[in-house]
Structure formats: structure tokens, C-alpha cells
Image (cartoon, rainbow, N blue to C red):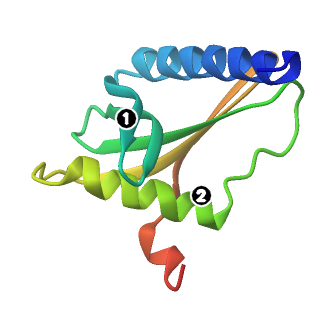
Amino acid sequence: MDRKRKEAERRGRLGEDFAALLLLLKGYRILGRRVKTAAGEIDLIAKSLTGVVCCVEVKTRPAEGLAEVRSRQRARIVRAANLFMAGRPAPLRFDVITVAPWRLSHHRDAWRPDDLKGL
């Protein structure tokens, strides 16, 4: 692995740590980190105080700026979430946490599976 890729990997893991801490401080319970399924990986899975299971995509950036989750990635995360949730009846939500220097932003209900029809 080259140096740039290692640095990006390290920054991503650190961002996930900060995102998990943010969720814990908000009262969420972390159910899984870097959860792998046959459809792909989910950065964080957490349960809110109201019992909603949240699949969280963490976007870490070295500077403030746009952190987009593209529609194909959203569709992959939805498929992975459906596999994870099989046999676990609970409400499901898709969130995004952006991590940049000195700023964490939690975007609840960032998208819905119905938004992805046709992908």
C-alpha cells in the first residue's frame, strides 16, 4: 500500500472513531463497526434511544468541503443493511456523519431506500 493510501485509511479509521464517539455521546448504542456483508460494508450500525437502527456512512475529509454519498454507494449500503437486518425486525434509517478538522456533522435520515428506485 502506498503512503497516500495508508494515510487515507488512517484518517478514515480515525473519522469512524470520532463518529462512534459522537453517537455514544448522543445516547446511541453501537451495534457494529465496519460491518461486512455479501453486498458490502457499513461503516457504523447504531441503535438510537427510540429503537431505530441507523446505518451510518462516515465521510472523513482533510478539510471542510463536500462529502457526497453517491446513489450507487447508497444502493449498496441499502442492500448490505437489508442483509444485516434479515431476521431483526426494527425500524431502519440511513445517516451520514461528516468528519472534518474541528467539525462533526450528523445528518439523520440522509436518504431513504425509496429514493433509489431503478438502481
- Which residue was labeled with disc 2? 73
Q: Badge 2: few (under 14), some or many (20 or more) residues near its Cα, within 10 Å?
A: few
Q: Which one is nearer the viewer's eye here, 89 or 84?
A: 84
Q: Which of pointers 1 and 2 lies earlier in the amino acid sequence?
A: 1
Residue 22 image position (x, y, % from top left): 52, 19
Task: Identify the residue shown where x is 37% and y is 35%.
Answer: 45
Q: Secondary structure at mark 1?
A: strand
Residue 2 image position (x, y, % from top left): 84, 20
Task: Identify the residue shown where x is 57% and y is 22%.
Answer: 16
Q: Badge 1: few (under 14), some or many (20 or more) residues near its Cα, within 10 Å?
A: many
Task: Identify the residue shown where x is 68% and y is 60%.
Answer: 70
User: Disc 2 residue type?
Assistant: Gln
Q: Which one is nearer the viewer's eye here, 77 or 67?
A: 77
Tally of numbered tags: 2
**Quadrant in the picture for the C terminus:** bottom right
> Which of the 4 quarters of the picture holds residue 39?
bottom left
Residue 9 image position (x, y, % from top left): 70, 21
Q: CA distance from mark 1 to mark 2?
A: 16 Å
Q: Secondary structure at mark 2?
A: helix
Q: Is residue 73 left or right of residue 80?
A: right
User: Disc 1 residue type?
Assistant: Ile
- Which residue was labeled with disc 1? 45
**Quadrant in the picture for the N terminus:** top right
Given this view, does label 1 or label 2 mark the residue nearer the observer? 2
